[in-house]
Amino acid sequence: MSFEPIPVETEFAAKTLIDAAFSVYRELGPGLLESVYEACLCHELTLRGVAFQSQLALPVKYRGMQLDGGLRLDLVVENRLVIELKAVEMLLPVHEAQVLTYLKLSGHRLGILLNFNVPRIKDGIKRIVLELSPLCLRDFVVKFPPHTERKDDLSPFLFSFPSQT
């Protein structure tokens, strides 16, 4: 299975953002509010001449209807990179899911989940790529076994793809 590579311009924007995040972290360290890190990161990007938008409204489109669900992207760098900032004890799977959802809704492919509340900033950086695959969820076939030992045990379910001819 092949995927489209991330464009070089997007990779450059990611490198620039991470360099800026390192600068902010070196100066401030951990333990502050997310809003403080956001303001300082925006200032650092401005000093570097990097185009960005902060707190960008993200509408939800559902079956021909556009909803203002109150979603906001913390930062969009160079109109190609979604940044989700955190200042939490630890990143959770829900934070990654949040970035993936933002990527799907915004049409961008690369996101950076950036947690400043860590002993070393490199441990707070998570790169998230929305892969463009020819397969969609509707292509999955779920086969239910005749019976399962426990109702909450999902391991017996078999997942397969329809044959591609």
Image: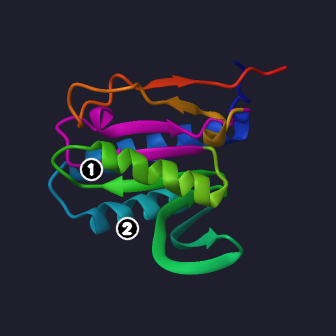
Quadrant of the rendered image containing residue 2: top right
Q: Nearer the viewer, residue 54 or 132?
A: 132
- Callout 2–callout 1 Cβ contact below 8 Å: no
Q: Where is the C terminus found, in terms of image quarters?
A: top right
Going by the numbered disc 1, the residue's amino acid type is Glu
Q: Which residue is mark 1?
A: 27
Segment colored magenta: 110-134
Image-based side of 49 in relation to 158, left or right: right
Queried whether the magenta region covers residue 111, the answer comes back as yes
Residue 38 place in picture, x, y as percent: 37, 63
Residue 39: mark? 2
Q: How many marks on residues?
A: 2
Residue 94 place in picture, x, y as percent: 32, 49
CA distance for labels 2 and 1:
13 Å
Tell me which residue sits at (40%, 37%) in the image: 126
Tell me which residue sits at (18%, 60%) in the image: 32
Image-based side of 90 in relation to 55, left or right: left
Label 1 secondary element: helix
Tell me which residue sits at (33%, 24%) in the image: 155
- Image: 90 above or below 155: below
Going by the numbered disc 2, the residue's amino acid type is Ala
| Farthest right residue in view | 165
Q: Where is the N terminus found, in terms of image quarters?
A: top right
